[in-house]
Image: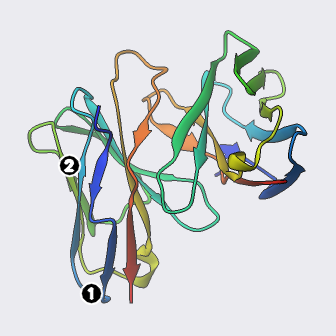
Amino acid sequence: DTGVSQDPRHKITKRGQNVTFRCDPISEHNRLYWYRQTLGQGPEFLTYFQNEAQLEKSRLLSDRFSAERPKGSFSTLEIQRTEQGDSAMYLCASSSWLRGNEKLFFGSGTQLSVL
Amino acid sequence: DQQVKQNSPSLSVQEGRISILNCDYTNSMFDYFLWYKKYPAEGPTFLISISSIKDKNEDGRFTVFLNKSAKHLSLHIVPSQPGDSAVYFCAAEDQGGKLIFGQGTELSVKP
């Protein structure tokens, strides 16, 4: 069990640029989640996949955000035309979903700073 | 609409004493709850969970209590240690299986 891996750990970008983050879940986990966390707040749900299918996307997520999990393994989260309000910690988590009551395992996150 | 609330942003406790962290929720359909611990610059790590068929779950120094009628849960840490200093998040699992988190409580355990 190598844990959930996220890359990069830190990203500094200028407003208007596109950024892409990668997440490698625990290998046997079928579910993968993306969350965002800002200072003083709890993790906020963005989207999740079961295998390669994107099952839910937060209503708060603008069209500038897109996520993929092409082969049901790793996932990418892309933010287009970044804004200063996108600055946050982006967290990926995975779980082995059967019928509920499963805990999520989180990666260390990608800290995004938009200047 | 904050479905899971932690109304105390911070808590300071003396080493060896009990720490009590509280969490309230609004959706009566929630039936599985978790506590996560987070250190700076790291992702949250799972601490303990409880299903709604129970009102208490214990794991070493950590005990979670669930009061379904009050829609309230609490995490007790006894005895508290300096290494417990971290941000603690309460979370509830919704029908789709995703977790909804509270805002967190920063615990500081002083030697």
Label 2 lies in what chain? A
Q: Residue sitting at 27 percent across and 35 percent down?
A: A26
Q: How is the image coloured?
A: rainbow
Badge 2 vs badge 1, beta-carbon distance below 8 Å: no
Q: Secondary structure at mark 1?
A: loop
Label 1 lies in what chain? A
Q: Measure the alpha-carbon separation of dots 2 and 1.
A: 23 Å
Q: Position of residue B87 (x, y in %)?
A: 66, 53
Give the residue number, with chain letter if any, for mark 1: A16
Q: Left or right of A72: which side holds B34? A: right
Label 1: few (<14), some (14–19) or many (≥20) C-alpha neighbours in 10 Å: some
Q: Left or right of A83: which side holds A66? A: left
* Vertical position of residue B9 compared to residue B80: above or below: below
Q: Which mark is residue A75?
A: 2
Q: Position of residue A86 (x, y in %)?
A: 41, 74
Q: Position of residue A82 (x, y in %)?
A: 31, 80
Label 2: few (<14), some (14–19) or many (≥20) C-alpha neighbours in 10 Å: many
Quick one: quadrant of the C terminus of chain B? bottom right
Residue B102 appears in the rendering: yes
Q: Are marks 2 and 1 on the same chain?
A: yes
Q: Residue sitting at 56 percent across and 61 percent down?
A: B40
Give the foreground label among 2 and 1: 2
What is the total number of numbered labels drawn onto the structure image?
2
| View extreme (top): residue | B53
Q: Which mark is residue B99?
A: none
Q: Amino acid at mark 1?
A: Gly
Q: Position of residue B99 (x, y in %)?
A: 50, 38
